[in-house]
Image (cartoon, grey):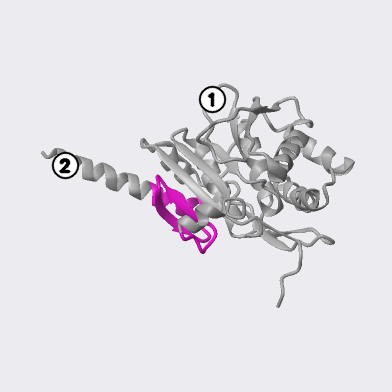
């Protein structure tokens, strides 16, 4: 059966410290929130409902070159009030329509709050077009080599909020494991903008980058960077590389990715202790 256009099922992570999960299912005509596992988080439910509408509009913005309507701008502006400290969106343009669409979307978001600014800083080694999200004066840990529309627009909004000081809400044990990591981890996450499974992975790795400044995640749209996809023989999305080596494929949760990363670091520490000898 053919998939309906603009139809997605999203799960936006684990809220609080239990299994309170809310799923979002929508089509262009009928966005709705499906509460799961006794979710009682009103902010979460409202936020998901809003993101459903916003996803549709942003998809159409790229498709039809339209701007956010007044109602959706107002709702996004309300949620951006949860930002507690200034956030910079640092753009590395590459020219062409894709770059223009990316910059237009970021400027549209920045126009809704004084705490988000857009700056262009060409960097020779960066993928283009791309942009990073960072606190003012800090090193960026989150980067998008993509124009994150469709399901991934929620990843962009959440990343801006979390970099801007809105707390990361997830399993406390996993958060502490990520916070205690001592090595540098550079993730490259290859996605498709129509991939529902990619959202969980992108948001999980972005949260880790917020928790621990030694973690960096770049989300890469395989449709834009097709030469990389071919060179690495990527056939599944999401596909995650860590420090240049394959780390995982397919859907994974924050807890699963965190546990895997923790195990890798513990193994490295054990190997170093063994190499030093008694």
Position in image of residue 209 (x %, y %): 51, 38
Q: Is residue 180 left or right of residue 106?
A: left
Residue at horizontal 73%, vertical 43%? 101
> Mark 2 — residue?
275
Q: Is residue 261 left or right of residue 149?
A: left
Q: Is residue 182 left or right of residue 232?
A: left
Residue 239 among those drawn in magenta:
yes
Badge 2 marks a residue whose secondary structure is helix
How crowded pointer 2 is (Cα within 10 Å; few <14, some 14-19, many 20+) is rated as few
Nearer to us in this view, 12 or 88: 88
Residue reaching furthest to the bottom: 1
Residue at horizontal 75%, vertical 51%? 55
Q: Is 252 situated above or below 43? A: below
Give residue 270's mark. Answer: none
Image quadrant occupied by the N terminus: bottom right
Residue 33 among those drawn in magenta:
no
Quarter-of-image position of residue 85: top right
Position in image of residue 236 (x %, y %): 52, 63
Quarter-of-image position of residue 238: bottom right
Q: Can see residue 253?
A: no
Highlighted range, magenta: 233-261
Q: Is 260 situated above or below 183? A: below
Q: Can see residue 209?
A: yes
């Amino acid at each position: 059966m053919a998939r309906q256009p603009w139809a997605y099922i999203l799960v936006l992570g684990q809220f609080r410290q239990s299994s309170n999960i809310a799923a979002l299912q929508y089509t262009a005509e009928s966005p709705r929130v499906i509460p799961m596992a006794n979710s009682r988080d009103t902010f979460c439910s409202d936020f998901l409902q809003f993101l459903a509408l916003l996803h549709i509009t942003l998809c159409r913005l790229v498709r039809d070159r339209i701007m956010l309507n007044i109602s959706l701008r107002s709702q996004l502006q309300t949620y951006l009030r949860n930002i507690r400290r200034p956030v910079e969106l640092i753009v590395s343009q590459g020219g062409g329509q894709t770059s223009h669409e990316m910059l237009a979307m970021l400027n549209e978001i920045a126009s809704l709050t004084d705490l988000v600014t857009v700056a262009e800083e060409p960097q020779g080694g960066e993928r283009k077009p791309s942009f990073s999200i960072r606190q003012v004066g800090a090193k960026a840990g989150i980067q998008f080599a993509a124009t994150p529309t469709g399901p991934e627009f929620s990843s962009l909004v959440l990343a801006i909020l979390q970099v801007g000081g809105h707390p990361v809400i997830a399993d406390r044990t996993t958060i502490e494991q990520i916070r205690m990591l001592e090595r540098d981890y550079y993730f490259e996450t290859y996605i498709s903008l129509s991939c529902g499974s990619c959202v969980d992975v992108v948001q999980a790795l972005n949260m880790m980058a917020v928790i621990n400044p030694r973690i960096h995640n770049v989300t890469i749209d395989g449709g834009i960077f097709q030469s990389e996809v071919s060179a690495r023989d990527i056939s599944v999305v999401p596909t995650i590389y860590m420090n240049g080596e394959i780390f995982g494929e397919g859907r994974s949760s924050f807890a699963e990715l965190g546990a895997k990363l923790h195990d890798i670091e513990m193994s490295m520490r054990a190997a170093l202790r063994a190499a030093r000898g008694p």
